Structures are given as structure tokens and as C-alpha cells.
Image (tube, helix red, strand yellow):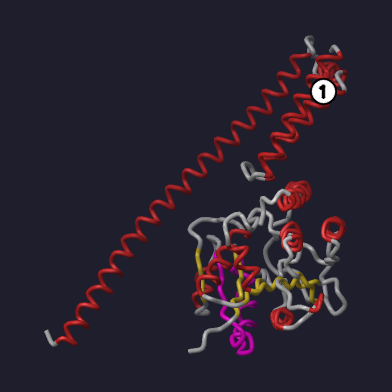
Amino acid sequence: MERKKVLIIIPAYNEGKNLPTLLDKLSEERFREIGDILVINDASKDDTREIVHSYGLLMISNIFNIGYGSSLQTGYKYALRQGYEYVIQLDADGQHDVENILKLYEALLTRGCEGKRPDIVVGSRFLEGGKSFQISNSKKIAMRWFSFLIKSSTGKIVTDPTSGLQGLNKEAFSYYSRFSHFDYHYPDANMIIQMLLLGYNVCEVPAVMHERREGTSMHTGLLKPLLYMLTMPLCIWNTIIRIKRGLQK
Amino acid sequence: MSILLRILVCIGGFILLIFVREANIKRKITERQSLFWIGMSLVIIGFGLFPNSVYFIADVFSVNYAPSIIFAIFIMMMTYGIFHTYKVGADLNDKIQELAIQVSLLNEENMKLKKEVHDGKEKSTDYYTGL
């Protein structure tokens, strides 16, 4: 049997209500042809494990909750060990339209921005051709602020710096898979800055995103977004200093 | 508060701030943990820059001896810090225990698999040698 080149990583925590819709769509032949699907069950307390089992997909179940970033890094390590060429990551809440997978894969294979193949492709809901759901004003401000920080530190315009929908080639995900190369607490705009400053080619493609149907986001409440807004600029600042001092190579 | 003491307090705050930033950059503490210590250092610098704030807070809480409000604030913050550290320690302990159990189980499974592979190999060798 021919080995597939792409691994589609879906980190999931208590997404039992959203997963069946997503996995139904991913069961279509055109997605199965592209790559294998790996669900990282982050010690969910609901029926996530049983649902993934019923679809016969690859699954890694964490023995305790290790968070979104660590789950992603587990996926990168798995992809590296199993010899995949590309990784496409999407959220389990159904916000990322599955059609984006094809766009990301195509972008990873073609010479896009700066005339070379990208190492990382970010799905952006704000580019022409993209589609977004209603975003709160506070989140819009945060996104603009992070875009500004990316632009001022790297010179690159990234319209959707908080997008979790990404495609990575082997160079990028093998770099992320190494210890201390991926911020598993806050893998966001700081990671885009890190990769850009390290010379990786990061491109954006238009992406379609939907409103989550069931459950709540990990950024809900008052304290969590506030802490996030304080912590992320600190993470970005640290990333820039580490690279300037040669602590991050 | 004398000028000299205010300068010393500000320097103390700055030194703490630099220590925290360096520890965070070298990944000795996380960004989230560093927020707490950055807050602490800013409070110290604030008291050095605006010593009247101490008297103001003391008045609000009807404290006769104003400097005791500084001790009270720091005791509260330290208590929170120690409590949080205990919580993190207990959480880590639980996780290490669980990991140790999982590693033991995996070792046992691994030994079984190794034995199965070894036995399988022996059988196939027997087949080819006709023994």
C-alpha cells in the first residue's frame, strides 16, 4: 500500500458533539485520498474517544489533559516518526471548513508567495475569497494588534495571526516537533514571528470558517481572554529576544 | 519616605523585573508565571515612585501605621504565590505518578511483545532448519 504524504491532525477536547459532523465530511474519498487523519484526544471527558473509534481513524489519547499546543506537538512528533511529508492541522469544533484542506495542500505544493514553496500555509478568513463568522470587537482589536506586531517585527503582513488552520511541510513540522521549539502554552502569532525570523516561508491562503455549533471555545469568559491579551505580547517579545540572542535556532 | 529609600525601592523593583524577564526568556518560568512577578515588581516600583499611595491605601483601610500596609500587601501576594506553587506541585506530582504507572504498563507490554517476536523468530528458524 502506498504511504500517504499528508497527515491531517485534529486536536480534540470534549468535542463529542461537533466531531461527527466533521468526521462525516472527512470520510469523503477525496480527503481520504490526500492523507491520513489523526485525532489527538486530549483526555476528553465526553465520548470523543468512542466517536473517533467508530470512524476507524488514527487516534492518540493523552492520559491526562495536556492542552491544545502539546496535542499539536504530539501530532508533529507522530508525523515525523511515521515519515509524513506534510501536516495539515484543523480544529475539532467544526469552525474550519474541510474544503480548506485541499486549498492548504495545493498551496504547500505550489510556488506561492516570494516565488518559492511555502513552509507554512496559514488559512486566513480575511483574505479575498475567505469567509468568516461574526467576530467580537475585542477579538478584532486583538487580531489587528497581533498583525501589527508581526508586521513591525518581521515586515510580513499576516491578516489572520490567530488562525489554527495551518499546513506545514516537513522542515516546519520537524522543527516544531523538537523540544522547546514550539510554544505549547500559546502557539499563536508568536510562532508565526519565530518561523519568519528563522527564515521559514510563511504564506496565507483564503479560508472559510464557520461559527462553532456546540460547546464553548477555550478563549471564553473574562479572565482567560484578559490573560491571553497580557501573555501573548510577552510571548512575542520573548520570541524576538530569544532569536536575537541566538537562544532559539 | 526619604529620597534615598525611594531610589533603593525603585532599584529593587527594577532588579526583580530584570530577574523575572531573564528567567522567562531562558524558559525557567512560563510567561503566565512571569506576569505575577512582573506585577509584583511594578507594585514595588510604584511604591518607590509614589510613596503617598501607601498613606492613601492606609487611610482607606484605617491603618494607623502606614508602612504596615506594604507588609500586608506583600504577605498577601506571597501567600498567593506560595499557595499557587503548592497547587502546581501537587498537580505535577499526580501527573508524574500517572506517567510512572503508564510507563510500567508499557514496559510490561513491551516485554511481552519482545518475547512474542523472539518466540516467532525461533519458530521460523526451526521451520527452515527442519529442527
Magenta region: which residues? A14-41
Q: Where is residue A212 in the image (x, y as percent from the top left)?
A: 72, 68
Position of B1 relative to B128 (above/below): above
**Foreground residue among B47 and A248:** A248
Q: Residue furthest left?
A: B131
Q: How crowded is mark 1: few (under 14 residues within 10 Å), some or many (20 or more)?
A: some
Letter of the chain that mark 1 sits on in the rendering: B
From this viewpoint, is residue A14 visible? no
Q: Where is residue A80 in the image (x, y as percent from the top left)?
A: 55, 70
- Mark count: 1
Position of B122 relative to A222 (above/below): below
Residue wearing tag 1: B47
**What amino acid type is highlighted by mark number 1?**
Phe
Q: Where is residue A123 in the image (x, y as percent from the top left)?
A: 76, 73
Residue at figure coordinates x 83%, y 64% from the top left: A135
From the viewer's perspective, is B38 left or right of A126? left
Q: Residue furthest front?
A: A246
**Foreground residue among A163 and B10:** B10
Position of B24 relative to A165 (above/below): above
**Foreground residue among A187 and A220:** A187
**Foreground residue among A195 and A148:** A195
Residue at figure coordinates x 87%, y 22% from the top left: B50
